[in-house]
Each structure stands twice: as structure tokens, then as C-alpha cells.
């Protein structure tokens, strides 16, 4: 004869089951999300992808054959290797005789690309995804001449291996084929980007304007700092300048300080001062991101972005999920008080979570102020001259603001979720652009209007 729980025991079991599902389910979801983020992380990818190298690991090749890598501080070496592996796994390598390119060659070619772009976050050569290697200088049927290297509109970066190796064998002769061709690839990717890399493209245009007088000097006299090949055109001038920039930065900075400064801004590196990541312009040296004491309370903000009622949407969504999956919480509990207790528990946890997620943002004097925790008074401040650009992304119930900025000579990025209305976002964008801060909306640059 089956035995059934009485009504009181049944109610207690339902309440206990609901509480267990809620209290255990949320941490499990958080752990799953954390594990998913770990699987997506670069450190995990490096561990997995490094297993595909059958010979020497990238760090062994780089340490023995790549001077730039040896000079990096230890904390930057792991990221350099990560970028090298990522470049190899997103690029096709070929040799003139259709033989497979060995791993050491792949690592060194990838390293030359990473060296050029190491100061730039999330940069790539876009359509230039193919590396073709010749053993020596090769004959080009279009130009009817022998070439050491080229970057063509088919998406190929072509290299003479003999000249590539010679470029790194003497790291102070200001001739480096790898850097030269990678500079062409970067230049062309900016030229063909159609606004997606507006910030770098604008810096490149400024560099070219500054470079014209030096290019003319190369053509008309022998007094230029750069070798004669740099006078061919502005694109060759940029590639020759890059070679000089990395192989003799002291001479470059001494003879052409303005042009050196422009190239530091483009690549976000300063070899003369041994800054492999992060370049602070001279005027930025006097500004710290820490807002002066007393200014936070005494200054009136020009704009304040507070969380709006839209922040409740995720909370309602979570609550609705539980109500649908556990319908007896509403319909079948005999004790109404237990029903209210559970719902109040849901509400408290959800609002506590959203209170931590909600951010408050202010433009206060020359500083962008971020209040990270809705329940506390702790703030983070960034001086406007240290902001490289900001990017807004719309994510269903919120706008995510990514701020790319300089901190202690390093480029950093911070994500700020803003639960607010669209008109407030537009006001913030206009105010940022008034301060000459570059703004991006859903991966497109917002053009400042007169």
C-alpha cells in the first residue's frame, strides 16, 4: 500500500526543493559561465594550440632568433607568444615549391607581424591572410623585375627568406624585410578599412602630412635621415620609417623628433625609451587618471548617466523563468506566506546582483568618473586626454561602453554596462566628441558634425 506525504510535509518539501534549486542553481550557472570564459581565454588557447608544434616551442625559437622578444619584460612575453600563435592559426603559409612551410619559419614571420602591432589592441592585417615564401629574390612577371618582397591586393605578403633572415641577423642596419612588408600590410589594411579603423587611419593621415617635407628632401638631396628608397612614395616612406624606428630609434628620435612622435602614436610603442607597449604623448605626462582630492565633491558634472528602470528587465526575466519552471510556487502552495517569502527572496537576490552590475558615469571637469558599485561610494577616474577612444555596443537591455585608455604607459580597456535610455547615450556621445574623444557605435565610427 503506497504511502503519500501529508499536505504539510508536501508543502515543506516543495519549499525546500525550490530553495535548493535557487541557491544551488545560480552558483552552478556562474561556474559554467566562468568555465566558458576560461575556455575562451587566450591563456587556455595557448596551452592547447602549443601542442600542435611538433618541433621547438615558439618561445625557444623566439629567444634564440628574435632580438625584440628577448628585450621584452617577462610579463609581456606570454602575450607576445599568444599573438604569434594566433597569427599562425589565422594565416595560410605557402612556399614557392608548394612544400609545407616549417614551424620555425612560421613563428619568425608571425613574430615580425606581432612586433609591428604589439602596441595595438585587437589589430589585424584584414584581407592579408596569406604568406608566400621564396628562398631568394624572385622574378615578378608584372613588374619584370626581381623582388625581395611585396604585399599585393590578392591578399598575399610575399617574402624572400634569405633577405628576411638577413634583416634580423643585423638588427641595427635599418634594413629589415619582415618589418618593411608588414608595414605595407598595415598601411594598406588601414587604407582599405572604410572607416572601421578610423582612429589609426586618422593618425596615419597625419603622419603622411608630416612626412611630405622629409620625402621631398630624400628626392632632392642626400641629407635625409632615411635611405633613398623611402623617397619612392608615401607608402614606401612609411615602411622605411618603420625599419628605422625599430632598428635605430635613437637616431630617428634625435634627427626627426616630430615624425618619430607621430610613428609612436600610430604603433603605440616607443623603442627609444624601451616602451614595447604603451606610448604617452609629452602633454599626457602631466596628467594622472586619479582625480584630485576635493574635485569630486566641488565640481559640477557636465553630464551624469544613471541606471534607468531598464535595469529591472533582466531581473524580471530571471523571476519569470523561475515562475514558469516552478508553477506550483504560484498556483499550488497552500501557505501564501511561503509563496511571498520565496518571491521576496528572488527579488532581494536579483536586485542585489543588479545593484552590483549597475554603473553610474559622470563627466566631471576633465575626468570621466565611473562608479562601479551602485551600493558603494568607490569610483574610478580617467583623464580625458588619456582616452584613446570609446565604443558603445547595444546589448538588448543595456549599452556596453568600452573605454580604451592609457594608464602608466600601458593601453588598457574597461567595460562599463550602462542600463540607460538611448537619448542619454546620444547626449554622452556628443559631450565626449566635444572634448575631441573618438566615439564608436556598434563597430562604426561616429563622425563629429560641425
Image (tube, rainbow, N blue to C red):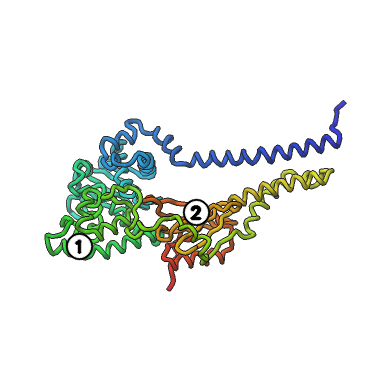
Badge 2 is on which residue? 380
222 or 359, which lies in front? 359
Q: How many marks?
A: 2
> Could you tell me residue 195's position as x and y percent?
40, 62
Badge 1 is on which residue? 214
Judge from the rendering whether residue 374 lies leftward or rightward of residue 381; answer left or right. Answer: right
Q: Residue furthest right?
A: 1
Q: Residue at x 31, y 43 (%)?
A: 111
Element type at mark 2: strand
Judge from the rendering whether residue 255 lies leftward or rightward of residue 152; answer left or right. Answer: left
Q: Residue at x 67, y 46 (%)?
A: 349
First reached walking from the N terminus: tag 1 or tag 2: 1
> Could you tell me residue 149's position as x and y percent?
23, 49
Mark 1 surroundings within 10 Å by alpha-carbon count, few (fewer than 14), some (14 through 19), many (20 or more):
some
Of the 4 image quadrants, the one containing the N terminus is top right
Q: Which numbered circle lies on residue 411?
A: none
Of the 4 image quadrants, the one containing the C terminus is bottom left
> Could you tell me residue 356's position as x and y percent?
59, 50
Q: Residue at x 59, y 63 (%)?
A: 421
Amino acid at each position: 500500500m503506497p504511502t503519500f506525504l501529508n499536505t504539510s510535509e508536501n508543502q515543506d518539501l516543495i519549499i525546500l526543493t525550490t530553495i535548493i534549486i535557487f541557491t544551488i542553481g545560480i552558483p552552478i550557472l556562474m561556474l559554467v559561465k566562468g568555465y566558458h570564459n576560461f575556455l575562451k581565454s587566450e591563456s587556455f588557447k595557448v596551452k592547447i594550440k602549443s601542442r600542435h608544434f611538433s618541433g621547438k616551442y615558439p618561445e625557444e625559437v623566439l629567444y634564440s632568433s628574435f632580438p625584440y622578444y628577448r628585450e621584452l619584460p617577462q610579463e609581456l612575453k606570454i602575450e607576445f607568444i599568444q599573438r604569434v600563435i594566433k597569427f599562425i592559426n589565422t594565416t595560410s603559409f605557402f612556399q614557392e615549391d608548394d612544400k609545407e612551410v616549417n614551424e620555425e619559419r612560421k613563428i619568425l614571420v608571425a613574430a615580425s607581424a606581432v612586433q609591428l602591432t604589439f602596441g595595438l589592441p585587437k589589430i589585424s592585417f584584414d584581407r592579408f591572410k596569406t604568406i608566400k615564401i621564396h628562398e631568394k629574390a624572385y622574378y615578378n612577371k608584372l613588374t619584370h623585375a626581381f623582388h625581395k618582397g611585396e604585399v599585393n591586393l590578392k591578399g598575399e605578403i610575399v617574402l624572400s627568406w634569405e633577405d628576411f633572415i638577413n634583416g634580423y641577423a643585423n638588427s641595427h642596419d635599418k634594413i629589415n624585410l619582415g618589418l618593411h612588408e608588414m608595414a605595407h600590410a598595415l598601411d594598406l589594411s588601414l587604407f582599405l578599412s572604410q572607416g572601421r579603423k578610423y582612429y589609426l587611419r586618422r593618425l596615419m593621415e597625419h603622419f603622411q602630412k608630416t612626412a611630405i617635407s622629409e620625402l621631398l628632401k630624400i628626392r632632392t638631396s642626400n641629407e635625409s635621415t632615411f635611405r633613398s628608397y623611402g623617397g619612392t612614395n608615401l607608402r614606401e616612406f612609411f615602411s622605411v620609417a618603420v625599419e628605422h624606428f625599430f632598428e635605430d630609434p635613437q637616431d630617428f628620435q634625435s634627427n626627426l623628433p616630430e615624425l618619430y612622435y607621430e610613428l609612436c602614436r600610430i604603433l603605440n610603442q616607443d623603442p627609444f625609451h624601451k616602451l614595447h607597449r604603451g606610448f604617452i604623448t609629452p602633454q599626457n605626462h602631466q596628467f594622472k587618471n586619479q582625480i584630485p582630492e576635493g574635485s569630486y565633491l566641488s565640481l559640477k558634472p557636465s553630464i551624469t548617466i544613471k541606471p534607468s528602470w531598464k535595469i529591472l528587465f533582466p531581473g524580471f526575466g530571471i523571476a519569470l523563468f523561475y515562475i514558469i519552471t516552478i508553477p506550483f510556487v504560484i498556483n499550488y502552495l497552500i501557505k501564501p506566506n511561503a509563496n511571498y517569502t520565496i518571491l521576496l527572496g528572488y527579488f532581494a537576490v536579483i536586485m542585489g546582483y543588479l545593484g552590483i552590475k549597475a554603473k553610474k558615469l559622470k563627466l566631471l571637469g576633465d575626468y570621466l568618473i565611473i562608479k562601479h558599485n551602485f551600493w558603494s561610494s568607490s569610483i574610478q577616474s580617467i583623464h580625458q586626454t588619456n582616452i584613446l577612444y570609446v565604443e558603445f555596443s547595444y546589448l538588448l537591455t543595456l549599452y556596453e561602453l568600452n573605454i580604451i585608455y592609457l594608464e602608466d604607459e600601458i593601453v588598457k580597456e574597461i567595460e562599463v554596462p550602462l542600463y540607460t535610455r538611448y537619448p542619454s547615450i546620444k547626449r554622452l556621445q556628443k559631450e565626449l566628441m566635444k572634448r575631441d574623444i573618438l566615439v564608436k557605435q556598434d563597430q562604426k565610427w561616429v563622425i563629429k558634425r560641425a
